[in-house]
Amino acid sequence: MVKRVAIIGAGVSGLTSIKCCLDEGLEPTCFEKHDGIGGVWQFTETAEEGRVNVYRSVVTNTSKEMTCFSDFPFPEDCPNYLHHATLLEYIRTYAEHFHLLNFIHFKTTVCSIRKHPDFASTGQWVVYTETNGEQTSNVFDAVMVCSGCYAEINLPLVSFPGIKNFKGHYLHSWEYKDQKGFEGKKVLVIGAGDSGGDLAVDISRTGAKVFLSTRSGTWVYSRISQAGWPLDMIFTTRFNKCITSLLPTCIMLKILEKKSNRWFNHENYGLIPLSRDSTFRELEKG
Ligand SMILES: Cc1cc2nc3c(=O)[nH]c(=O)nc-3n(C[C@H](O)[C@H](O)[C@H](O)COP(=O)(O)OP(=O)(O)OC[C@H]3O[C@@H](n4cnc5c(N)ncnc54)[C@H](O)[C@@H]3O)c2cc1C
Ligand SMILES: *[C@@H]1O[C@H](CO)[C@@H](O)[C@H](O)[C@H]1NC(C)=O
């Protein structure tokens, strides 16, 4: 009998899961709580609770060569790094090309998953869903959880004593859409990660003054690497992977630091991270 598979979420992971199930002769049913595909990449004009929020200016930090589905290259005329709208368009084309949309139940939230009473012998699961306030349950042979990980915010106000008395406006980057409302303002962006860097640049175009604060320093690198190649294409290669696994980590980090400082001397800016290997470890993971 054909195995029935429940897939939670129709973002990039959910869509590829539908396709893989079809390729393997399984019967996928995908549940998506919103009304469209793409997850993270579905831009909305205002931040909505329970949903990942991308700001208007988001451009991918991974090149199209490394970001594409392995069985579906980007069109030739796409730039190396993609604006979120271009990426969503690509994801739509992928879903249509492989006829994945028919397997998705939109506006349907998976509320809970329980083991079927016969689980010990069948391995089946009962999936409880809700569509427009109506609850249903269905039995599946397997469940793939593709629900993403950026929908909940972490705003640690306890780390900022006195913030309650602050007369200005404060917000989490999750709420941020664009520079509107920040024109002519003096702004402090806390945290020099992906979002912090992007937002500081964004706001600086019309703000009076922007500070980007980092607790422990950070490695700064460009999307573009040697000879103009995208950084991840140069870095994420089988050869590099091999070298990385052969060399002791401390030597590997020294080489990376040296390379990085040749392009941008972190010492000149007081940016050398306290924990020297943090970002490079991320790069290493590729
Ligand atoms: C600002 C930003 C920039 C990023 N830039 C890049 C980049 O340049 N390159 C890169 O590779 N990655 C990037 N990422 C990472 C990105 O998260 C992944 O690339 C990828 O889009 C994640 O896909 P996903 O399908 O796992 O999750 P999501 O895209 O989050 O999709 C999850 C889906 O599950 C649905 N869902 C959740 N819970 C339920 C439920 N209970 N019932 C039904 N449906 C549910 C959601 O509605 C959503 O549609 C970025 C992320 C962010 C936030
Ligand atoms: C790209 O951005 C996302 C979201 O901020 C982050 O999770 C990921 O690590 C970044 N990737 C790279 C290669 O910088």
Image: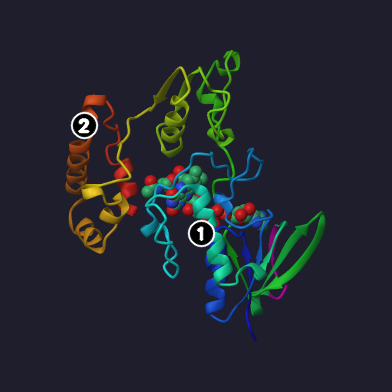
Image coordinates for residue 13, horizontal then vertical, percent: 53, 61
Of 18 and 69, nearer the camera is 69
258 with respect to 67 (left or right): left
Image coordinates for residue 55, horizontal then vertical, percent: 53, 39
Is residue 148 visible in the rendered image? The answer is no
Q: Residue at x 28, y 29 (%)?
A: 271
Q: Residue at x 50, y 25 (%)?
A: 159
Q: Secondary structure at mark 1?
A: helix
Q: Is residue 111 magenta?
A: yes
Figure quadrant of the C terminus: bottom left
Q: Residue furthest front?
A: 77
> Compared to 242, does 255 lie above or below?
above
Q: Secondary structure at mark 2?
A: loop
| Image: magenta residue range | 110-118
Location of residue 275 (image quadrant): top left
Read off the residue under disc 1: 90
Q: Residues within 10 Å of mark 1 (few under 14, many from 20)?
A: many
Image coordinates for residue 103, horizontal then vertical, percent: 66, 70
> Compared to 90, does 231 lie above or below?
above
Image coordinates for residue 41, horizontal then vertical, percent: 55, 50
* Residue type at numbered disc 2: Asn
Of 3 and 131, nearer the camera is 131
Q: Residue at x 74, y 70 (%)?
A: 138
- Which label number is shown at residue 222? none
Q: Residue furthest bottom?
A: 1
Read off the residue under disc 2: 265
* Residue type at numbered disc 1: Tyr
